[in-house]
Every structure is written in structure tokens, then in C-alpha cells.
Image (cartoon, rainbow, N blue to C red):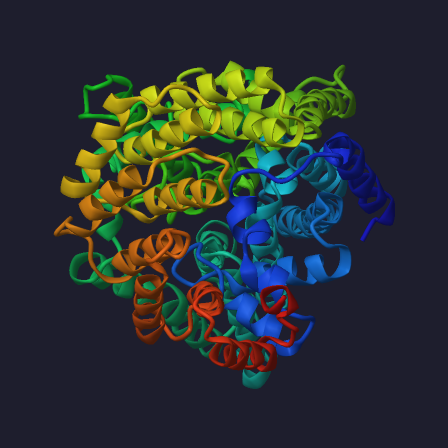
């Protein structure tokens, strides 16, 4: 490996992302890190680490390995965002090196089979330019400076390791059955580790199928090797695909659509346009379109609503056809297209996820960058008077300047929140983030100007919210109105009460309600008891409120009751029942301890604290005190 190129790549990553280091936490960082009781309350122990790994709420697997990294980060440097961001940048630098190794092997392989001519650049320098453009590309910024998205970048690390192992296996044709089986076993292990960071790690095996179809073309030295490959892809692609189809039809993989403002058909149609949005931002990045929030992206109601939906579908069919048609002459073209599209097979297809996130392109964007560099190299090689290096250097500088400028925005959370509103004024999420940011500033400085900006931003977030977010935004707006001492908005309260009684409520609604009740309990929000009681009466009369969500409501209700004179015993009865139904829920146990102490059941409370100390490896002195 050329260490000069490696060092240059690492330096480039550091320089581009250095402006973003002073920034803080944002959005999902709070629920996954700052508000995670397992991270902050458990001691430094194997038991504490294990419980933290199980505390993840993102994805069906819970993403235990990034949760472990958050736990270790807190034990090393507390909740200082600097350490977390330095780690993320380091991961991205490591990934850049891995990308360079993988792309270089691709180009050397193609060169040996007369499918690639490096011309004046050569495979190694071409691989360097591919990697540099990918490493400094602004599409990857949220995967680096957004702390919680190390889930994406670290999943990519082990995906790249798995790809490299597979390259070695296929290009050296490992002699001996045990070596072949062992090598493929390591690839599967890399994929499973990657999936523990994020479920998209399972796409490793689709990426390898792309390698096989467009580069290696199933050419083997023996029937035994082919047999191993058949078994490998049956286990890693065919079997999971059948399982996904079965769970989609007969399971609950698609159950989340009832909380989204779109249905399955609308999502699939919309994603065709989202794919082209990603492609345009990768090939010709426009700074004013980048954001953490894209909830203002128009949902496709049909093939002609808007017309770009049909055009997008036709466009995808065209590029796929072109990649297949020219696979023999330009295998890197079909490879790049397939690599990009396969990278979106989970997050941009049928599953009921949020429509648009830039970090979904972290690894898939590599496919398009390969096409960009090799296409330009091929065109520039036609002219003997144009040196390719300055052209790629200029493109790299343009990409890097956009990324560095955006990274500077991330160095200051209020600035970042304002930028996101400027770029996406129709985004409810952007306005909500602005409101939350200025609310925190108000709490720190009690400046009425901050309160005014915050309240207006929350009002805009409420007005712009789709049906899936309307109730949550309404609760938050009412909360802020009370917090800032404004006159009570009775119409807004009536809307909330009606929704609590008659509409489906979700976990985010309950989180907003809990923050409001805590504000009331701490005597920060001046709310009369009759309003609080009416809220819980309506909620508990909602026939659709069942299971764990009903327990969450009862937990919040007990949180309120324990502060009302004469209602402490009722709070205790509620909390005992909830803990009996959810014996592994730490938040419920902590609240029960608090209620026990309020009701003077000290012996039982201390016993529970001792049990928590033994299990999580920390002294629960704050509660005891």
C-alpha cells in the first residue's frame, strides 16, 4: 500500500472536519446518549456495559455495539461532545483508508483483465482520487459530525473489512476447502458485526453479489469453489430475502405505516424521486439542499403526482439497463450503479422509515464516485493536452470547501439550527430543532428574546407538522406557552385533549407529555391540577391505548400523582403494578423507589437500591440521599 496516499487521505479528513469539532449534541444524540439512564447511572463494569448494550431503541436489533461505544465514551470523558466527535472523525479516516484499499484492488483486478486502463493516472492514483472525493464529500457529513450516526460509519467499517476479505478470497482462489470455508466464515462474521452497529450491515452480502456479478462473473478454478459460493449466497442473500418477504407479508415488518403520513405505495413511489435527489447531491452537491431534516420532501400521491415520479422511475430503469448493457465493456459502470442502488435496498424501499436522510448514502455514494472519477478519467484520457490530476484536485477542493463550510455550521448548535431553517423553511423538524435549541439557551440565561424565538419556532413546527407529528408538536407548543408565562391557549388544549381521547397516540407523544408533566412537577410550568387530571382521564379512556404504551402513560400519571398531596398512595399502587409487568425496565424501578421513599417505605426502597447496585455496579446514593 502507498503510505503517502494513506497519510494524505487522513490529513484531508482531519482538515475538512476540524471546523466542526467544537459543536454539541443534537436530535437523537439526546435519547441515545444524554438521556440514557444506563450510560449515566451504571458504574464502569461488565454488567453496566451489558445493560447499556441492551438499552438501544434504534432498529430491530437495538444496535448494541454503538451503544457500547457511547457507554465507554462516557466513562472516559463524560458527556463532553468533543471526545465523541473525535472518535467519529477517526472512524471516518479509517474508513477512507479501507475504501482506498478496496478500490485499488478493484482497479488492479480490472486492469489484469483488460477492463481498465489507468492511462497517465494508473490504478493506484485513480483509487486515491476516488477515495479522496468520497472522504471529503459533503453527503457524508452527518455520518461523521452527528455523533449518533457512528452507527452508520462503524457499520461501514466492518462492511469494508468484509469486502476486502472477499476480494482476497476471490482473487487468490484460496487453496483447500478449509481455507475457503474459513475465509467465507470471516466474511459472514464481519457482516454480523456490521449489523450489530446498524442493520444496513447486512447489505454487505448484496454488495458482494454486485462484485460477483460485475467483476468476478462467477469465474472459479474448481467445482468445489463454486459449491462454496453457492452455499454462501444461499445463506447470506437468498435465505434472508425469503425471510424478509415472509415477515413483510405475515409479520410486522411493515406495521409502522400507521404512524407515518404516507402508505406503502406512496413511500415506494416517493423513494424513486429521493434516489434521484441523492444522485444529484452526490454528483453535483448543492450546499443549500443539505440538512439533517428533509420532512418537507413532497410525498408522491401517484405516478403523475408529481410528474417527476414517473420520470424518476423511468430514469432508474434506464440507468440499470445501461449498467447491464455495457457490463462487458465498462464493468465499473454497472458496478457503480448496482453498488449505489443495493446500498439503498433497506432504507429506501418498502420499510416504513422516514423518507430522506443523507447519512443513508455514506457507503452507497462510493459507487457513484467510482463512476464519476472513471468516467472523467476516460474522457480526459482522450485528450493528450489535459492533465487529469489538476481536474480531480479542483473537484476535491470544491467538495472539501462545501464540507468544511457545513462543518463550521455544526460547530455552533444555534447557528446550525438557524441554517437548517434557512435551507428548509417548510420543514417542521428544522423549526422544532430551532425551538429546542433556543429553549435550552433560555433555560441557561433566562433571556426573553430566546423565549420569543423559541416559541415562534415551536409554533411554526406545529403548523408545518404532518399528521404523524401533529399531536407531539401540539403538546410541545402548549408546554412552551405555559413555560414562557404566556396566556393559556384553550383551543390548542382542547385539540390535545380530543386527540388523547380519540386518536392513536405514539411513544413520541408520551415523551412530550412527560417533559410537560416534569416541568409542572418542578414548579417551572404553572399548570392547574384540573388540567393535568383531564389530560390523564382522556388518555386512559382512549380504547386504543394498550400494552407498553399504556404503562408509559400510567408511569407519567404516577409521576404527577406523587406530587399531589393525598394522592401518593395511588401513585405507589400504580408503580407497583407497572414494575410487576415490566421487571426489567430501569426507569420504572427508579420511579418506584422514589415513590416508596415519598410514602416512607424506606426499607423496601433501600432493598431495591441495593439490588440495582449489585446488578449495575454503582451506588444509588443520589436516590438514597
Q: Is residue 20 visible?
A: yes
57 or 444, nearer to the observer = 444
- Please report the residue visible at 47 percent of the width from the left and 40 percent of the height from the top: 519
Name above or below for residue 377 compared with residue 102: above
Taking the image as shown, residue 476 lies to the left or right of residue 253, namely right
Residue furthest right in the image:
4
- Please report the residue visible at 48 percent of the width from the left and 24 percent of the height from the top: 484
Name above or below for residue 212 compared with residue 173: above
Taking the image as shown, residue 410 lies to the left or right of residue 237, namely right
Residue 578 locus on image (x, y percent): 32, 68
Numbered circles on residues, count = 0
Name above or below for residue 247 compared with residue 363: below
Name above or below for residue 311 compared with residue 169: above
Residue 312 locus on image (x, y percent): 31, 25
Residue 576 locus on image (x, y percent): 34, 72
161 or 597, nearer to the observer = 597
Residue 148 locus on image (x, y percent): 57, 47
Q: Is residue 162 visible?
A: no
30 or 520, nearer to the observer = 520
Pick the quarter of the image with the C terminus.
Answer: bottom right
Taking the image as shown, residue 304 lies to the left or right of residue 36, namely left
- Please report the residue visible at 35 percent of the width from the left and 24 percent of the height from the top: 462
The quadrant holding residue 613 is bottom right
The quadrant holding residue 96 is top right
Taking the image as shown, residue 414 lies to the left or right of residue 473, namely right
- Please report the residue visible at 58 percent of the width from the left and 38 percent of the height from the top: 26
Amino acid at each position: 500500500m502507498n503510505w503517502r496516499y494513506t497519510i494524505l487521505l487522513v490529513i484531508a479528513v482531519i482538515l475538512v472536519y476540524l471546523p466542526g469539532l467544537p459543536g454539541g449534541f443534537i436530535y437523537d444524540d439526546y435519547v441515545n446518549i444524554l438521556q440514557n439512564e444506563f450510560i449515566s447511572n451504571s458504574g464502569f463494569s461488565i454488567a453496566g456495559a451489558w445493560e447499556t448494550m441492551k438499552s438501544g431503541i434504534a432498529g430491530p436489533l437495538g444496535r448494541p455495539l454503538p451503544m457500547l461505544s457511547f457507554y465507554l465514551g462516557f466513562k472516559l470523558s463524560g458527556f463532553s461532545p468533543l471526545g465523541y466527535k473525535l472518535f467519529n472523525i477517526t472512524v471516518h479516516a479509517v474508513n477512507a483508508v479501507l475504501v482506498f484499499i478496496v478500490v485499488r484492488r478493484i482497479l488492479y483486478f480490472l486492469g489484469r483483465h483488460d477492463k481498465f486502463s489507468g492511462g497517465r493516472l494508473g490504478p493506484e492514483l485513480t483509487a486515491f482520487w476516488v477515495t479522496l472525493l468520497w472522504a471529503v464529500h459533503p453527503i457524508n457529513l452527518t455520518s461523521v459530525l452527528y455523533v449518533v450516526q457512528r452507527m452508520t460509519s462503524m457499520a461501514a467499517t466492518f462492511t469494508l473489512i468484509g469486502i476486502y476479505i472477499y476480494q482476497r478470497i476471490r482473487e487468490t482462489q484460496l487453496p483447500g476447502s478449509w481455507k475457503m470455508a474459513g475465509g467465507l466464515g470471516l466474511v459472514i462474521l464481519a457482516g454480523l458485526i456490521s449489523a450489530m452497529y446498524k442493520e444496513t450491515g447486512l447489505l454487505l452480502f448484496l454488495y458482494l453479489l454486485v462484485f460477483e456479478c460485475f467483476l468476478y462473473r462467477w469465474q472459479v478454478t474448481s467445482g468445489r469453489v463454486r459449491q462454496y459460493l453457492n452455499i454462501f449466497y444461499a445463506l447470506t442473500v437468498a435465505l434472508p430475502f425469503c425471510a424478509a418477504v415472509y415477515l413483510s407479508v405475515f409479520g410486522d415488518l411493515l406495521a409502522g405505516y400507521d404512524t407515518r403520513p404516507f402508505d406503502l405505495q406512496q413511500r415506494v413511489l416517493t423513494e424513486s424521486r429521493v434516489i434521484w435527489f441523492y444522485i444529484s447531491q452526490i454528483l453535483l452537491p448543492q450546499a443549500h439542499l443539505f440538512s439533517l431534516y428533509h420532512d418537507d420532501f413532497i410525498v408522491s400521491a401517484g405516478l403523475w403526482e408529481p410528474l417527476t415520479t414517473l420520470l424518476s422511475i423511468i430514469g432508474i430503469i434506464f440507468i440499470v439497463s445501461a449498467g447491464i448493457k455495457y457490463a462487458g465493456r465498462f464493468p465499473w459502470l454497472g458496478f457503480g450503479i448496482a453498488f449505489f442502488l443495493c446500498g439503498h435496498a433497506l432504507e429506501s424501499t418498502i420499510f416504513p422509515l422516514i423518507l430522506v436522510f443523507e447519512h443513508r448514502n455514506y457507503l452507497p455514494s462510493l459507487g457513484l464516485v467510482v463512476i464519476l472519477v472513471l468516467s472523467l478519467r476516460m474522457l480526459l484520457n482522450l485528450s493528450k493536452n489535459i492533465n487529469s490530476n489538476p481536474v480531480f484536485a479542483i473537484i476535491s477542493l470544491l467538495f472539501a470547501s462545501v464540507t468544511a463550510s457545513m462543518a463550521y455550521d455544526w460547530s455552533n448548535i444555534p447557528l446550525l439550527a438557524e441554517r437548517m431553517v434557512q435551507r428548509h423553511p417548510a420543514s417542521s423538524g428544522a423549526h422544532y430543532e430551532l425551538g429546542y435549541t433556543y429553549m435550552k439557551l433560555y433555560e441557561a440565561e433566562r433571556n426573553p428574546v430566546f423565549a420569543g424565538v423559541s416559541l415562534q419556532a415551536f409554533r411554526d413546527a406545529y403548523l408545518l407538522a404532518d399528521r404523524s407529528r401533529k399531536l407531539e408538536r401540539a403538546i410541545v407548543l402548549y408546554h412552551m406557552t405555559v413555560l414562557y408565562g404566556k396566556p393559556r391557549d384553550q383551543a390548542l388544549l382542547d385539540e390535545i385533549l380530543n386527540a388523547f381521547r380519540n386518536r392513536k397516540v405514539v411513544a413520541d407523544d408520551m415523551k412530550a407529555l412527560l417533559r410537560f408533566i416534569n416541568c409542572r412537577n418542578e414548579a417551572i410550568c404553572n399548570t392547574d391540577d384540573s388540567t393535568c387530571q383531564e389530560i390523564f382521564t382522556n388518555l386512559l379512556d382512549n380504547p386504543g391505548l394498550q400494552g407498553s404504551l399504556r404503562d408509559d402513560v400510567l408511569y407519567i400519571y404516577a409521576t404527577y400523582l406523587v406530587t399531589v398531596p393525598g394522592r401518593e398512595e395511588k401513585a405507589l399502587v400504580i408503580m407497583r403494578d407497572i414494575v410487576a409487568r415490566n421487571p426489567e425496565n430501569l426507569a420504572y424501578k427508579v420511579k418506584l423507589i422514589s415513590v416508596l421513599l415519598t410514602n416512607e417505605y424506606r426499607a423496601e426502597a433501600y432493598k431495591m437500591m441495593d439490588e440495582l447496585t449489585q446488578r449495575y455496579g454503582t451506588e444509588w446514593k443520589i436516590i438514597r440521599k
